[in-house]
Amino acid sequence: MKAKILLIYTGGTIGMIKDLRTGELKSLDFNYVFDHIPELERLHVDLSSISFEKAIDSSDMTYAHWKQLVDIINDNYETYDGFVVLHGSDTMAYTASALSFMLQGLTKPIILTGSQLPIGTIRTDGKENLITAVEIAAAKNADGSAIVQEVAIYFEYSLYRGNRCTKISANQFEAFSSPNYPPLAVAGVTIEYKLDQNLIKKRHVLQVYKNLETRIGLLKIYPGIPFKNYEFLFNVKQFKGIVLETFGAGNAPNNQDMIDLITNYIDAGGIILNVTQCSSGSVRQGQYQTSSFFEKIGVLSGKDMTTEAALAKLMFVLGNYSTREERINKLNLNLVGELTV
Ligand code: ASP
């Protein structure tokens, strides 16, 4: 029996065309993409599609769009075997991270893909990305279960865990990397899946979480940062949680203004998650003197999470758990494969 796949078109470069007057790339509707990939008809899948009312550049994605995606997937979850989300690459890692927390207990694949070149361009990467993403979404084990049972990003011959990805290139076809977690699959002559099927727990039940705390801040520190100028951020009335991007293994300057701001913020109920600015590796608070303060005062280690995953996790945890103890407990755990414990 053919697998039933739902293609969800949100926009992105894949469906854009150059405005000849201004030279800017503008989004077009899904028929444009479909017309350029007649091969989709020849795949051994039963393909249906649904589109955002207006295709958007992924820079325009908001929490509302994430919720819209969650609704589309949830409403169609029983009918389809897998989902492919066509999405701009710029914020794809944020959306993938958010979806991984908002849709838990998946037994079906949700594959996000897009392209660096529009589909109407001769050298487009969009065709391969879309065709292989559909194949992956349709792939099943001998017992009929889906091979991939999570939110993933497929780009340039690699399938990555969605909440481990980050966009690393604005112009290379290899636009994504998953620095702290190996690819789930690599597409060559065949698609080599590297998932440990024993680790995929049997028969989950889908749990949908649409509450997100959106009052979350993000601060990347830099040498000599004038912390006092960031006082507005460390105000728990404005920001319930903050992701702090620190140096190396989670280090920050020994700066009294920072110590005061963070101490008062945490005392007032704020939550701070410490992630590294490095593109790979993990936060290890207390390894250096320059991070011992974080550990003592109750800044939480984001371990090896990407910034995208840390933001999405804070939004999810603060939106769904109310006591400080529960929140801290959840933030320290590996909930959906987003960190290495
Ligand atoms: N600006 C585009 C977007 O994110 C880039 C892309 O699709 O690759 O929508």
Image (tube, rainbow, N blue to C red):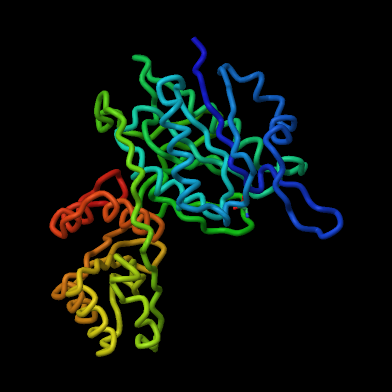
**Residue 101 image offset from top left, x and y in percent:** 34, 45
Of residues 233 and 277, the one drawn nearer to the viewer in this rendering:
233
Left or right side of 157 for 275: left
Of residues 84 and 128, the one drawn nearer to the viewer in this rendering:
84
**Residue 40 image offset from top left, x and y in percent:** 65, 25
Residue 262 vs 316, above or below: the answer is below
Residue 47 vs 100, above or below: the answer is above
- Which residue is drawn at the image coordinates 70% and 47% (left, top)? 27
Left or right side of 267 for 193: right
Residue 74 vs 269, above or below: the answer is above
Answer with the quarter of the image where residue 281 lies: bottom left
- Which residue is drawn at the image coordinates 54% and 43% (left, top)? 155
- Which residue is drawn at the image coordinates 41% and 26% (left, top)? 77
Residue furthest out toward the top: 1
Of residues 238 and 122, the one drawn nearer to the viewer in this rendering:
238
**Residue 183 image offset from top left, x and y in percent:** 42, 43
- Which residue is drawn at the image coordinates 79% and 51% (left, top)? 18
**Residue 103 image offset from top left, x and y in percent:** 35, 38
Residue furthest out toward the right: 21
